[in-house]
Amino acid sequence: MKNNITIRPVTESDAKQLLDIYSYYVENTAITFEYDVPTIPEFQERIRHTLKKYPYIAAVKDGIILGYAYAGVFKDRAAYDYSVEVTVYTHRSHHKEGIGKLLYTELEAILKSMGITNLYACIGIPADEDDEYLDHNSMDFHTHIGYTMAGRFHKCGYKFGRWYDMVWLEKMIAEHDAIDHSIIPASSIIR
């Protein structure tokens, strides 16, 4: 616990608080390429779907969610089961307070316990350097905590009347020895 912040599993009842964080990014940034803010029932379904196999966690202080992180399918083929895509969002008034790092540290520990070896982050970056909807903060954050460039797609996302690049960053969290086990569902590890 850092500064009275606890990390705990997300439940469907958290959907409104999570959506309060996420809606800002949908409406005001190109951090997500989603155009429309999901409804609470849609967001609850997203939580339900993720929790079937993967961790979904929140950073909480005094009952208020300050940020959240989760893992999901990287590619939907059995050969990719040991790789996941990771996502983190912090409340816009709590940037650069270490919350993202706290969340990712816990998320990585859970994923490693599950048998996951590779983490991937899909990040939008400005195609042109000066952009009011997107900067390099997310890429800088991920590289600071050990992610490296895996690939860049040029002008593949279109939002706010302009094109954006997208990069895939990767981080290896376990050895790539011969695998003799299936992935353990997150629900078996965290409660």
Image (cartoon, helix red, strand yellow):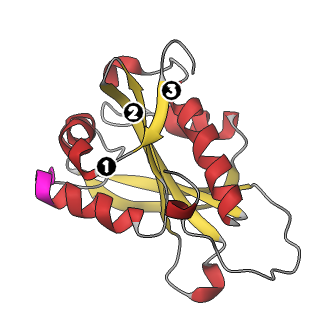
Q: At 64% across and 74% down in the image, what residue appears?
A: 183
40 magenta-colored = yes
How crowded pointer 3 is (Cα within 10 Å; few <14, some 14-19, many 20+) is rated as many
Labelled pair 2, 3 in contact (Cβ < 8 Å): yes
Image position, residue 117 (x, y; %): 73, 64
Q: Is residue 72 visible?
A: yes
- Where, quadrant-wise, is the N terminus in this rendering? top right
Image position, residue 25 (x, y; %): 27, 39
Q: At 34% across and 17% down in the image, what residue appears?
A: 62
Q: For the residue marked with disc 3, what is the amino acid? A: Ile
Tell me the SS state at disc 1: loop
Q: For the residue marked with disc 2, what is the amino acid? A: Gly
Q: At 23% across and 64% down in the image, what residue appears?
A: 45
Q: Work out whether mark 1 precedes mark 2 in sequence or the reverse, and give the earlier one.
A: 1
Q: Is residue 153 visible?
A: no
Judging by the rendered image, the residue that carries numbered circle 3 is: 99
Judging by the rendered image, the residue that carries numbered circle 2 is: 67
What range is drawn magenta here? Answer: 36-41
**Measured along the vertical axis of the image, is residue 58 above or below residue 184?**
above
